[in-house]
Image (spheres, helix red, strand yellow):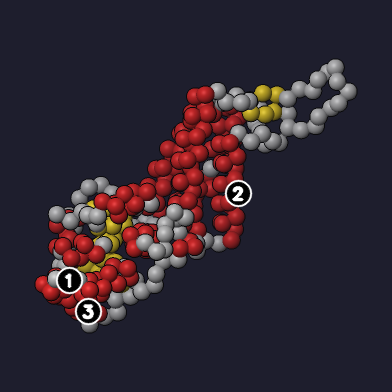
Amino acid sequence: MQKITSFIERLKNKLQTIEDKMLKFLDESEIERFRNDPNSSIVFIGSPFYWKELKEPGKIMQMELKKLYSEWFEHFYLLLSSASNQAIEEAKETNSFITEWIEHCSGWGTPATIEEAKTKFKEGIKFFYDYLKILSNSRDNSLILIPDTNSLIDEPDITKYSCLVGISQYTIILLPTVLEELDKLKIHHREPEFRNKIESIIRRIKGFRNQGELSKGVTINKSITVKAIAMEPDFNKTLKWLDYSNNDDKIIASALEVQKEYPSATVILLTSDINLQNKADMAELPTMELP
């Protein structure tokens, strides 16, 4: 199995990248002391220091850093859906701090030197590291596989997924959009042979239900858990570019809900659909293909 880390680990690694790039960006920045004109009777009262206008290399770094950080924060914010009001406020304050520093917004908090700026930035970003550390302490090292419709059609026997991931213990999550697509194919596909295949897949899934509550999880082969999600994802609490009317986007949004619920687990979307793979990459969601 290719090395895939948990959502928490990926967020921590990317946050470290952002911090490293920010420190390099500060090396391209300059701070100057504001001085009143001694020959003028008008005195301006304000911050004693301000960020000088960036040169071209700094402006390029600023644009890259702004994009990288905004994408990171959108993914991090998904984890705050069940957080305390205090944690949400701290996250918003930290986000404002980092955004203003990337934008070089001068004010009373502008430091006197670049070295002081680096120290203040490291202190200002600390909340994100601390919050990710708290979530990582859940120590949920489980492997969660989320097959799309084509993956279930290509290989209905989910016990054989162990050959793909290299271990025999994992959880399969069946998404509502996938089950809905199977039902539609069973009824509307023009080929009788294909409809029969879909029916056999649905019978297999119904067989899992006979062993227990799929919403809570059913164990098969002693080491594989199968769970089904009943509710559609909340598109008001997911990545803003996902479209509710698009089934691929529904699958991505549901997979993100799973990832959000089990942030320390390794969550993988099983799909051979190139468009779905591309969208999953944008959503920071790992994918694998069945052989």
Labels 2 and 1: the sequence-earlier one: 2
Give the percent coordinates (x, y) of residue 120: 59, 36
Choose mark 2 or mark 1, whichever is in front.
1
Labels 1 and 3: the sequence-earlier one: 1
Asked if labels 3 and 1 touch by Cβ distance under 8 angstroms, the answer is no
Name which residue type carries label 2: Glu
Q: Is residue 259 above or below residue 98?
A: below
How many other residues sit within 10 Å of disc 1, few (<14), some (14-19) or many (≥20)?
A: few
Give the percent coordinates (x, y) of residue 110: 66, 33
Gap in angstroms between the C-alphas marked 2 and 3: 48 Å
Query: Residue 190 bears which disc, if any?
Result: 1
Give the percent coordinates (x, y) of residue 79: 46, 57
Q: Which residue is mark 3?
A: 206
Which quadrant of the rendered structure holds the C terminus? bottom left
Label 1 SS: loop
Gap in angstroms between the C-alphas marked 1 and 3: 24 Å
For this orientation, the residue located farthest to the front is 190
Q: Is residue 31 above or below residue 276?
A: above
Residue 229 in view: yes
Label 2 SS: helix
> Residue at point 47% right, 55% down?
240
For this orientation, the residue located farthest to the left is 193
